[in-house]
Image: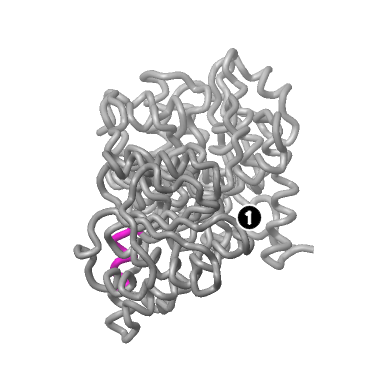
Amino acid sequence: MLELLTPAEMAEADRLAIAGGVAGIDLMENAGRAVADAVARRCPRGAPEICVVAGPGNNGGDGFVAARILAERGFPVRVLLVGERERLKGDAAEAARRWPGIIETVSSQAVSGAGIIVDALFGAGLDRPVSGLVRATIAAMNSAGVPVIAVDLPSGINGSSGALMGEAVNATETVTFFRRKPGHVLLPGRLHCGPVEVADIGIPASVLERLRPHTFVNCPALWAEHFPIPKLDGHKYARGHAVVVSGGLSSTGAARLAARGALRAGAGLTTIASPRDALAVNAASNLAIMVRPVDGAAELSGLLADRRLNAVVLGPGGGVGAPMRDLVLAALAGERAVVLDADALTSFAETPEALFAAIKARGTAATVLTPHEGELARLFNRGGKPSDNSSKMDRAVVAAADCGAVVLLKGADTVVASPSGRVSIVENAPAWLATAGSGDVLAGFAAGLLAQGMPAFEAASAAVWLHGEAGNEAGPGLIAEDLPEALRAVYRRLFVDLGVWP
């Protein structure tokens, strides 16, 4: 289940299923049964009552079904409704009619005494901040000190962006339907979900052919088809040659981390293009990585004239200003894959159009930008801050379309977006990746995969996933130097899973 469906896409999936002959009330019955099953697993018989908090839409309808099924199984159940029963419509009204018990009016005190709470307020369809009684009720659910099972998505989380809409339920577990939503994976939404179960409610998988979703969970199934597998009869020259442009004497570490990352990721050869004043440091610090003297854009162009050097990283520790801009434009003037990170991006904060024009002039040649939020804002908002009203996914998609490159927007929920609108969102990154130099290694991983011929979107997505797995492998206390070394164990497991090793 790679696909992530926005609330609008999920509504269309429901519509297509109903148009294909599946009754809407049957979808709701199946959804409610899945919720009831999840509640029953957590609620032993004889426990305090189950409190179902139902909203005025279909999410509330799912709650009514769950309440009825749980009551039929002998559990004590109360149902609280936001709004008036008479205003329920369609399948939700029918689900309420089938509930044989009392429907109470919701209040912030009504959940007290419950042994478990079912959050069936809003789900993924919420599009405005919660307020008033609803906000107070969500706060009461959070402070009740009992398990909360969220129906579809914790109420108060935006299904498309994962944004907090004023106040949100802190769910112990979430039961969603057919496919997850971006709000389950993006932060802060992910933090509110707990484990997420995806229930089959009778929507045929064939509706995906009509929906053509463009957002995916970042995992090997998304990019494995394009992943470079070394061949027994291969050689290092067939696996590409990555180049990392180093900064001056006092800032060589970032380039060395990126170069090590590219080599570990599988590039057959890796070279550091080093200013002459840093040659001795770069050469003394590397064995398998070559070092070549390069001062300025003209010498970089000369080095890259060798077409075998097919991927280049610029930015890590490279310095901000005109010299870096010239180096970037020199690297972009060719068919090689280019990864732009850190200083390479900030150097164009005042003249982004020059960078975007150079990227677009490359046609199909691979270009990957790897900003964090601050760098993205400087480059695309002319020094401004990212809008609080736009989602991380939207920011990455708009940036990729504007500049014509794949944009890898870093963070615990790193988003990779292509100019065509394809998006991957990662969920395997541990907290301890937030350390100096971690992003330099990531840029190197991407370059190493690009050097081996992997397409840009897939290479960036794979690099992000490998980065997260390497962080998990290294564990708490890691420093950036640990990440390339941890990649060996990650590759071993990946190749076993792909059936290519041992």
- Tell me the residue at 43%/78% (across/down): 202
Residue numbers of the magenta segment: 6-14
User: What is the number of callouts on the image?
Assistant: 1
- Tell me the residue at 34%/66% (across/down): 61
Q: Quadrant of the C terminus?
A: bottom right
Asked whether 312 falls inside the magenta stretch, the response is no
Query: Where is 279 relative to 401, above or below?
Result: above
- Tell me the residue at 54%/33% (across/down): 439
Identify which residue, 427 or 57, lies in the foreground.
57
Say whether residue 70 is visible.
yes
In this view, which residue lies farthest toward the bottom? 21
Q: Main secondary structure of the magenta part?
A: helix
Residue 385 located left or right of residue 222: left
Identify which residue, 192 or 428, lies in the foreground.
192
User: How far from the left and from the top, in percent, is residue 295?
Assistant: 50, 21
Residue 229 located left or right of residue 148: right
Query: Where is 426 relative to 210, above or below?
Result: above
**Mark 1 belongs to which amino acid?**
Ala
Q: Quadrant of residue 383?
A: top left
User: How far from the left and from the top, in percent, is residue 209?
Assistant: 36, 75
Q: Which residue is mark 1?
A: 238
User: How far from the left and from the top, in percent, is residue 93?
Assistant: 27, 70
Query: Where is 37 relative to 403, above or below?
Result: below
Residue 97 located left or right of residue 312: left
